[in-house]
Amino acid sequence: MKISVIIPVFNEAKTLAEVVKMVERVNIDKEIIAVDDGSTDGSLDILNNIVSKSRIRLIKHNRNFGKGAAIKSGLKIASGDIIIIQDADLETDPQDFYRLIKPIVDGETKAVFGYRTAKKPASVYWWGGKTVSLITHLLYGGDIKDVNNGYKVMTRDLWRSLDLKSDHFQICEEITAKLLRRKEKIIQIPTRYFPRTKKEGKKLGFKDGIVSILTLLKFRFFR
């Protein structure tokens, strides 16, 4: 099976080149699709240099639309049997791909979510994520351990059937809500997590948690 790796990018110049190298080292038949979402820090220059060596496919947004918009752009051209989202911030390790795709390759499911494990989690983000997962359980049932883990892995057909609308980080809540409402089987796999702080470039904050909860409510009661 071939996989498509979609890398949404917004101002990740410090880590981007290393992330692409890490994905390239994964010994799986794959295509890499980077979506620059209006970066202003030199990320696009880095991607253009990588593309000149024919290593990745590149989509360019003329302004910052949001992570969800970047993912949706990547989905439009992805050709792999399995599609996986890889963040560009070095918080996760692409070596986890092997375990993440295995249940799909083995025919056990069409959807796999990672859930983060870390010895020293950044508490404000860690417990915010736990709160979102608890509210997801109360609204939709199931037992999703880590709604906001970037590792969402699904067959191409399942991805495209979701008709995703969200343009920002809350696309994770939309994906989860739609799969749970459909009663899709989701297998969860532990993944390594190397959290960074706000000072180091972490983009999510308290207000994003509030929007996440509102998104879950919207897809539970109004969609």
Image (cartoon, rainbow, N blue to C red):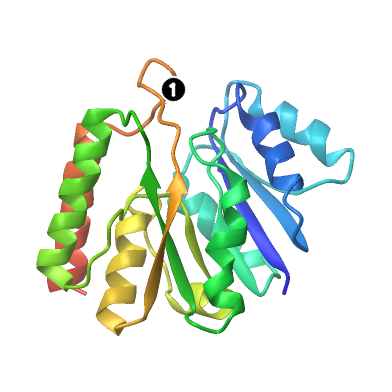
Give the residue at x 71% y 70%: 79
Give the residue at x 76% y 55%: 27
Q: Is residue 74 visible?
A: no
Q: Which residue is mark 1?
A: 201
Q: Residues within 10 Å of mark 1 (few under 14, many from 20)?
A: few
Give the residue at x 45% y 67%: 112
The quadrant in which the N terminus is found is bottom right
Q: How far from the left and from the top, in percent, is residue 19? A: 65, 36
The amino acid type, in three-letter code, at marker 1 is Gly
Q: Residue furthest front?
A: 119
Give the residue at x 29% y 83%: 183
75 relative position to 112: left or right: right
How many labels sit on residues?
1
Q: Residue furthest right?
A: 53
Indicate whether 12 appears above or below 62.
above
As rendered, which of 14 and 97 lies closer to the eye?
A: 97
149 relative position to 86: left or right: left
Where disc 1 sits, the SS reads loop
Instruction: State which quadrant residue 147 falls in.
Output: bottom left
Q: How far from the left and from the top, in percent, is residue 164? A: 41, 67
Q: Is residue 94 visible?
A: yes
Q: How far from the left and from the top, in percent, is residue 99? A: 56, 61
181 relative position to 165: left or right: left
Instruction: State which quadrant residue 84 falls in.
Output: bottom right
